[in-house]
Amino acid sequence: MTPTQFQGLISGARLRLRSKSAFFATLLLHAEFVPSREVAAAGTDGERVYVNPEVAASLPRDVLDGLLLHEVLHAALSHPQRRGPREKKRWNKAADLIVNGMVDAAGLPTPPNSRRDEHLEKLSVEEVYTAIEAEGDGDGDEGDDLLDGPPSDAPGKPGKPGGSAQRQWQQAMAQARSVDAMSGGQGHDPLGAHRELQRLAPARLDWRAHLWRFLARTPVDFGGFDRRFVGRGLYLEALDDESITALIAVDTSGSVDDDAVRALVGEVQGVLGAYPHVKAVLYYADTEAYGPYDLRPGDAIPDPVGGGGTDFRPVFALVDEHEPDVILYLTDGYGDFPEQAPRPPTLWVVPPGGLEDEGFPFGEVLRLEE
């Protein structure tokens, strides 16, 4: 199987899951899937998800979707890192029992011989481990998919410290809750009261998470997508004609420091990497608009241009030219605003010491942290 074919399988699963759950689909967007023939079907070390490409290609679509979600939930809930000195096989069984309950709640099939227990699967994995320890090994062993490290045939990549990977998944969980709320879900998790999710207190939605939420609330994201594309095998590439454009403007009048510029533009590039159908164009601006610069994941951030006064009107005059779906403007807010609000939603990203919220005549205000 070629890398393109492997990515096609993954893209198809991500698209299909959108129709079932914004919460779960967002988690899949954050996951990095890596081919490996050393895993029986799939496994995770808590950072990446390893998938046997031949096995994945042989599975019915709904079974594949359930398998990928199963492993992503293990990673998102930090099951490999939380095991500690506990017996590995029993811990894996306890984690599988919980995750299978979540996969079933998403409307996807679980393995034929997997154990289900409506009471235990609502508990934390530590509690389930204790419960099945008292029972003995029992039945329903699905294999050992919680890995101590990457398989030897996986492409090399420096591993993240355990705490770093856990923090990233906590942030992904917070973003999934946020996107779920905006798409009409419950806003915290799709399963109601569930101790395993409650145990992991959601990461505080800092300005980065709010930025992701703003860019994710698009017509394409988790709604309005023609599902016939999935059956035709077009996957994410089918979104090219329905891409979302973000107009990014950065105030270079001297009131915004370079660290804030790098933080915002770098985070936007992270969004672009996770949501391939989102496109972004960048302008620097003082009393004029300088650009456009195309933004792509991993590219160097263009050197700022400008340094005069502050006038927001030149950037908003570009709306008819670019027809963006959303506008982000990094500024302290002290400048000349257009008389009329633009059609696209606007997010003002304001560093410490910037204009008070009521000073902005339109749009939503997001404040960078001290």
Image (cartoon, rainbow, N blue to C red):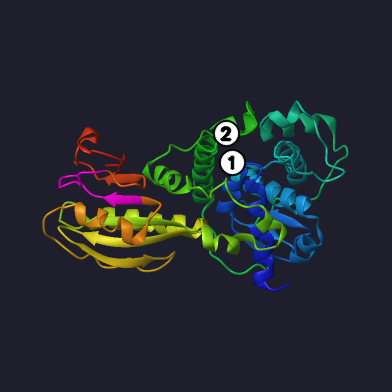
Provide residue 335's location: percent of width, then percent of height: 15, 47
Q: Quadrant of the N terminus?
A: bottom right
Q: Residues within 10 Å of mark 2 (few under 14, many from 20)?
A: some
Q: Quadrant of the C terminus?
A: top left
Provide residue 129's location: percent of width, then percent of height: 73, 34
Q: Would you say residue 97 is visible in this rendering?
A: yes
Q: Main secondary structure of the magenta part?
A: loop
Would you say the residues marked 1 and 2 are in contact, meaning their CB atoms lie under 8 Å apart? yes
Q: Is residue 102 magenta?
A: no
Which region is colored magenta? Answer: 327-340
Going by the image, does 217 lie left or right of 82? left
Provide residue 350's location: percent of width, then percent of height: 26, 44
Front one among 25 and 42: 25
Question: In the rendered structure, which disc, 1 or 2, sits on the residue that comes first in sequence?
Answer: 1
Q: Secondary structure at mark 2?
A: loop
- As displayed, is residue 89 above or below residue 356? below
Q: Would you say residue 276 is visible in this rendering?
A: no
Residue 183, quarter of picture: top right
Provide residue 98's location: percent of width, then percent of height: 72, 36
Going by the image, does 183 lie left or right of 358? right
Front one among 339 and 145: 339
Image mark for residue 305? none
Residue at 33% in and 45% down: 347
Identify which amino acid the numbered label 1 is placed on. Answer: Phe
Identify which amino acid the numbered label 2 is placed on. Answer: Gly
Residue at 55% in and 60% down: 159
Q: Which residue is denoted by mark 2 in the rendering?
A: 185
Q: Which residue is denoted by mark 1 in the rendering?
A: 23
Q: Residues within 10 Å of mark 1 (few under 14, many from 20)?
A: many
